[in-house]
Every structure is written in C-alpha cells, then in structure tokens.
Amino acid sequence: MSLSNRSLLAAAAVAVLGLCPALAAPRQDASGADARHIETLVARGLHPLAVKEARRFLERYPKSADADGVRYRLACALVETGQRDEARELLAALAKRSDFALRGESALRLGRLEWEAERLEPAADALARALAAGPAYLRAGAAQLLGEVEYRRARYAEADQAWQRALEECARAGTPEACSLEEGAAVRRAALAGRAWCAFQSQRYDDVIARIDEFASADPAAELDELWLLAGDAHARAGRHAEARAAFARVRGEEHQELALRGSAFAALDEGDERAAEQGFVRMLERFPRGAHASEAAIQLGALRLRRNDARGALGLLSSAPLARSAEALYWRARCEQQLDRAGAALASLDRALELAPQPELAARVQGLRAQLLLAAGRTDDARSALSAAGSADGLAAAMAEALNGGQLEVAGELAGDLVRRFPESPRRAEAELVLAEQRFQAKDFAGALHAFDDLARKSSDPALRRRAELRAAWAAWMSGARSEAATRFATLEPGAANDAERAELRAQRARCLTELARERSTAGDRAGADQAWRAAIGVDPAGAPAARLALAWSAYDADDAAGAARELDACLRDGGLSAEQRREALELAVFAHAKAGSGAAAAAAWREFAKSGATEERRAAAARSAAASVEQSGDAAGALALLDECVRGMRSAEHALALMEESTWLALGLGRLDEADQRARSTAQIAPRSAAAARACRGVADAWLARKDAARAREAYALATRVDVERDPTQSAERNAALYGVAWCALEAGEIKEARDVLRKLLDAPELGELAPRAAYLAGEAAWRAGDLAAGAAHYRRALDAGLEAALAPRAWLRTAQGELEGGRADAALAALARLDAALAANAAGFDAHDELALTRARALLSTPRRDEGVALLQQLAERPPSAWSARADLALADDARARGDEDEALSRDLRVVARYGGEAERSRALFDAAAAFERRGDAAQARAHLQELLDAHPKSALARAASERLDALSRDRRGTSAAGARRR
C-alpha cells in the first residue's frame, strides 16, 4: 500500500509571508512622509492605490533613501493585485542589495512567488538567501518553506536538512529577535511532519516511525491522521505488518478512513492473513461503496476469493456494473472464468479489457493470460501472437511478469529475449536481462546466472534493480557452492538494506554461508579453516552464536578432539542463549564427548541434564548407554549400572528400555553378580519375550551359568533365549540357533538324550547356521551315539566334518564315523575314515586321548578284511594292557573272533578273563552272558545258571539283565522238567 501525496503544513510560512515590516525609523522630509503613506495603504489592504502611489513616488524620488523600501511595498502590493511577474523582478533586485534592510524579507517573498509559480530551483536559491541574510524572526518560516521546495524537487536529504534548520530556529521562538511562540509551534509541527516524509521517501522506515512518535509526543492533541497513515505505510514497507495495522487503526477522521481501511487490508494481505484482508476490503465497500478506492477494493476482494478457490463468489463481485469498464476487473474476471472452465467467456472478458485500451503493463498481463488460455486450447500460433502483441517494451515487460506468474519460465525467457532484441535502448531492457539471468538460475546454471547478474549490476543505473541483481548474484554464488564468495557478497549488501528486517536477513544469510563453509571445510579435513569460519559466523550473527559454537563443538568432535568438543560445549551451555532444541543437542553431544574423552563422571552429569531436557526416549537411551560405558571404563561399573537403571525408570517405551536392560545385564555379569544378572535377563524376557535384547541377555547369562558348571540354570536361560522372533527379525536367527545349541548341550549333559536330539534336529533344519553348523552337527552325532544310533551318529559326524569342524574335534568325529561305518558292516569305509583320522592326528594330535578306543576300532575293522591277522594282533596287544574298558572290549572281540572260528575254548577263556580282570558293568555283563551261553552249548546247565545268576546279582541294571533273567528262567524250567521225568522213570 502506498500513499500518493502529502499535504503541506505551511501555515507558518504563509503567516511570515503576510508580514510587511515597517521602515526602521520615520523620516521628516516629504519623501519620507509619502513613503509612510504608501506603507499605510499596504497595511490597510488598499493595494491598487498603493501601487499607484508607489509608482508616483519612484518617479519623483528615484534616488531617495526610502526608494528601496517603497519598491518593497510596491512588490507586496503587486502580488496582491496579481501582477506577480513585475513583483518578482522587484524582489529579485532587492534581495541582492546588501545594504537594503529588508533584503531577507525580499528574498523570502521572492522564494514564495517562485514556489507558487513552481519554479523550484529559483525558489530554493531565494529561500537560501533569505536564511543567510534575513533577520532571526523569519528564518524558521524560510527554512520551513525551503524544506517544502526541496521536497518537491525530490531532494529529500536537502529537504530534511532545511526542516532540521527550521526546528533549530523554532527552539528560539518567543525571544525578542525570533519568531513568536505561536508561529514557532506551527513551523515545528510542519517541520516534524516534513522530516517524517523525507525519511519515508529515503526508505528509512525506522526513522519515519521515530519522527512521527516525536511529533505525537510534542503535540499529543494534534490531529495526526495523515501521519498515522504514513506510519502505517512505513511499517508495511518495513515488513512490520502487525504494527502497520495498528497505526492505520489510530486514524480517526472520517476523511481519512477509506485510506486507513485500505492500508490495513493491504497490510493484512502482505502479512499473509488473507481472511483479515478480505474483511478489511469488505468494510471498505460497506462504508465507502462509492469511494475513490471502491473499485480497487472490489478487485482485491475478488482476487482473494479466487485464491481460496471461490471462483464463483469472486466472479459475482467482479461482475458488478461499476467494474464493467475496468480493464483490471475484467482481467480478474477472466481469471475466475478460467478457473470455472469457461475458457470462451474468459477470452471474451479479456477481449473487452483490451478494447478499453489498458495501460501497457495491464495490457501485457491480459495478453499473457490470453496466451495461457489459447495454449490450453491448442492454439499455439494464436498464443504466440498474443504474447507478441505487447508491442512496447513496457508491454513485453508486463507479459514477462504474467508468464512468470503463470509458471511459464520458458515463455518469459523468450519475451525477455524479444525485448532485448527489439528495444535494446529501452529502460526496461534491464528487467528483461534480469529475467534472462533468473532463467539461468532456475535452470541451475548458477555460474552463468552469477555472471549475468554481475553484468547487469555493473550496467544498471536503477538502484533498486541493481540491488536486486546484486542480491541474486549473491544467491547464485551461494547455490554454486562458492560459500566464501557468497558470504562476502551478502556482507557488501548489508549497508544498503532498506530496513532492520532486511539487514537481519542478509546477516543471517551471510552467517549461513559461513556455516556451510565451515561444514565443507570440516568435511574436507580442514579443521582450522572450519573453526575460523565458525568463529566468523559468530561475529556476523550474534543471535546465531550459540548455534555456531555448538557447530564448533561438532567440528571438534568429528575431528576426534572429544576433549576440545567437551570444553566448547561446557562453555556454550554455561553462557546460555541456546534454544530448547539446541540445548538438547548440546547436552546430548556433551554426553558423547565426555564419554569419548574418558570423563565418565562428566558424561553422567551431562546425561542427567539431558534426560530433563525433553529429549525422546530413543535419544535418552543411546546417550545413557554411552555415558554408562564411559563410567564403567573409569572403573565404576556399579555407577554405570545405577545410571542405566535411572534411565530405565524414566522410560515408557519397552523398545528403548530393553536395550538398557540388556546393557545392565552385561554390567551385572561384569561385576560377578550372576544371580542379579539372571534376574535382569528374566525381567527383560518378561517385558518382551521374543525380543533380540532379551535373547542376547538370556544367552549371556546362560553362558555364565554354564561356566559355573550349573547346566540346569544355564538350560533355563538358554530356553528363554530361543523364543526370539526370527520371522519378524531374520537377523536374529544366529542368536536363536546359539540358544538352541545351548539347550541341546545342557540336555545331553543331563542325560536327556531324546530331548537333546529333538532340539538338535530342529537346529539342524534351520537355514544359515553359519559358524555353528559344524558344532551343531557334531553335538547331534554325540546325541545319536549315546542313543545307540551309530549310523545316524556317523551321518552327523560326517556332516560336521564336511562343514569344517574345528581341528580339535575332528579326530573324535572321524573315530565315531569309522565306528558307525563298522556297525553298518562297512569295514572298508571304516578304515577310510580311520585313515582320515590318522591324517588329522599327524597334523595336530594335541588333546586326543582315545588311542585305546582307536586301536580297538581299527582292529575290529581289520578283522573283516583280508588283513585279519593285523586286527588280531592289535586286539591281543590291547588285551594285554592294564585292565580297562578297552582291554576288556579287546578280550570280548577276541572271544567273538574265536567263536566265529569255532574255537569255543578260546572264546570261553577270553570271556572268563574279562570277568576276572574287569569290574565295568557293560563289559563284565557281556562276558558273563556270553560265558553262560558257552556253558549252555557245552551242556553244562549248572555253570550256565551260575554265570547268569552272577550277572543278575552283580549288575541288576545292566542292559543284559532282562535277557539273562529270561534265560535263567528257561534253564530252571528245563531243570525242573528233567527232574520230573526222572522221577516218573523211577
């Protein structure tokens, strides 16, 4: 919103110019009497008679001492009778006479005449002479009128100086030599108002407000409506839209109300409060339906309703009869019709607008909208004709603006190029070049845009356009990545800022440039350069200093200078000035910096402040883990545990509490508090039984119990760990598999072979066992072996070996594989497995202690091959060793071999040798059972029964006890039957 003019508060000047001072002293001669007579005529307003008498006097006394005084009176009378040209000549001559007492008054009168004739430069010269030569009483008025003249000449600095001089002269009002108090007050009011206008025209909007406030303070009762309008306009131009609306609201006079409502509505519009703006324009139309700005209000109201997609309501406003002859209204009406898909009606409205011969700028907008409609209709040639119809530079410039507003940057660029080609000398050429440069900018050709903006800024004589180009050049430098150059450019633009808001924005952007420069240097490893840029940013934008100092801390932290970062953060937090979010960020970084620097206590203290800052639970949890780790590393594991517990108590989300509870479990384990760790792990599992955190915590506790040889409690913890949800989180498969392995191992240790095998079967079916695959297969082999399923065991052992079983377990696996093959009657395969075992032992025999078992297995395998003698020899060697399970099994094997050869005596001897030498249940039971069978085959039932009875007495839980009992019963029945038959014979 702009005020078009200002009224002249020049009452004081008029009063001064009405003075016609008397001569210094009365003269006694005839000429003196005539001069006083002429003075009296002028004073009484008898100006025609005064002119006649003055002319007569000058004819009679041309050289009289009173002649110049009479000439002055004549000039005054001539002014009143309308003969101003003659009066001007007289006053010009009198003003130059250094010995004339009224030369100052003459100069003031002359200045007034020149001013009224709009001869501004001569008026200024005359008034300057009046100020220099005139008496004190007229200087205030002369300075006031000089200010008006200079203002009209658009020399606002000179006008401001003149009005300042008027204020200085008014300060002496009421003294004998100066003007009166009443006149001084009038001049002061006019000068204060004038200075406010000068500041406005110089775009010093803060000074405008200050001077109006000074006026209001000096004269609270004064009618200031015009100045409140000016204050509103100044606030609006400075971007202070709320203050602008408040200033317009202070206008009280009815004659200014339409302008006040208009200004308030436009201020609301500029503020983005379209609803308030709409209400303002509605009030304008209600109170001043035929006001000077009623049509403008209706158009603005229609445009606002169109913007909120009420095209129908807007069209109703813009279709009123008073607007039918408004090209602007027809343009907006067409916009409404376009939105309502009435392209034909829109084109008709635009054609009517063109018939009204609008100004070039509006005509170009009309043609631009026509082009959009024609393009949408597929009439490309007609659209281009519409755009080229802007036959003047002004028209092309307006069409450019319309194209830009319609988002048609390419069309705008074509129009700009057309303007440059067709009107190379036009003042609007610079605007076109600005559009072309902007086109490059939007196309992301920032280097080209920078060059174009710079070239335009050098050539342009328009300060506003030059500044626009310089500002866009700064932005182009910024977008091109030239941060340092952009910062310099924004700094250069600061002194010319129109107001504090613009200046603050420039400084803020300069600070952003320096901030980005600092980050880039930091990324490039130039920490010194980065810190320099950060500190420069602090100097540029004190309001952003806390953020820059926070960035300095980040720079140090990223450069692995955690101690430096911690120092910077401590100072930053101590000095304050951070926003709530910045303070949270600083406290969070302080936790990590102190932790990284090894200061656990400081990290814990920072975390406690951070926990109170409103941070999210996720951030609190992550910071707590870092602080706790630092506290633990400093030797205070209990303190770390307490900190984690403190964090958990403040958590509402199980997701974030779980990680802390897992961490606290490990800390408790580290402190040797296994029972406490077990309880923490179980609590974690209770909250989220299928979570990864619970699985890890429980498995860690299980491993600890296993290390203490408490397989039962280990098994419980492992079982909890197996519940982890691998379907939801496949990455936890390894965790679940490890827990399953632990459960199987503990079950096997407890002798629960079936459960162990079931768990291992599930484990081996799991995909991607990874490093666990060979050990799981090995454990499955052990379980199968203990269950007596040697074939299955051999298969598992083979799988373990194929999967890369560790070297320490490979010999035993090969041994079990050989035994399984032997059990299946595959002696050659067994010997092949034993050969692999021999190779493994040759590479690493450490830890292998099953040499007797190996010898027995090898011997048994050889017995079934052509190398039988080697097998027998090995068995004999083993049987002669000190009594053991393996020497006993060697004797049993030799007994089996003897029976196979039909040597019953040798077989019985070997069996009885085992009974005599060895006390092991399995081997001794077997020997007794086989011996009983041998005696039975010999027909010695008594010995058979005796050996079976010994087996039952000595080894009642033996695997052969049941078979022995059944055989003993059978032998006893046979004995009783034989005795009965003998009795009958007798």
Image (cartoon, grey):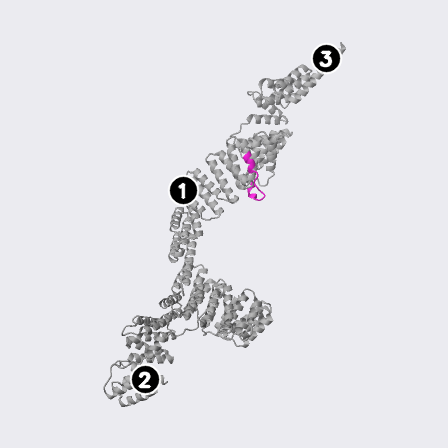
In percent of width and height, residue 471 lies at: 43, 64
The residue tagged 2 is 42
Query: Quarter of the image holding residue 212?
Result: bottom left
Q: Are marks 1 and 3 in contact (CB under 8 Å)?
A: no
Task: Quote the CA–CA distance across marks 1 and 3.
Answer: 97 Å
Callout 1, which amino acid?
A: Ala
- Which quarter of the rendering shows the C terminus? top right
In percent of width and height, residue 84 lies at: 36, 84
Q: Are marks 2 and 1 in contact (CB under 8 Å)?
A: no
The residue tagged 1 is 601
Q: Earlier in the sequence, mark 1 or mark 3?
A: 1
Q: Earlier in the sequence, mark 3 or mark 2?
A: 2
Residue range corresponding to the magenta coloring: 716-733
Callout 3, which amino acid?
A: Ser
Callout 2, which amino acid?
A: Val
The residue tagged 3 is 979
Task: Quote the CA–CA distance across marks 3 and 2.
Answer: 186 Å
Residue 386 badge:
none
Decide whether residue 904 is among the magenta residues.
no
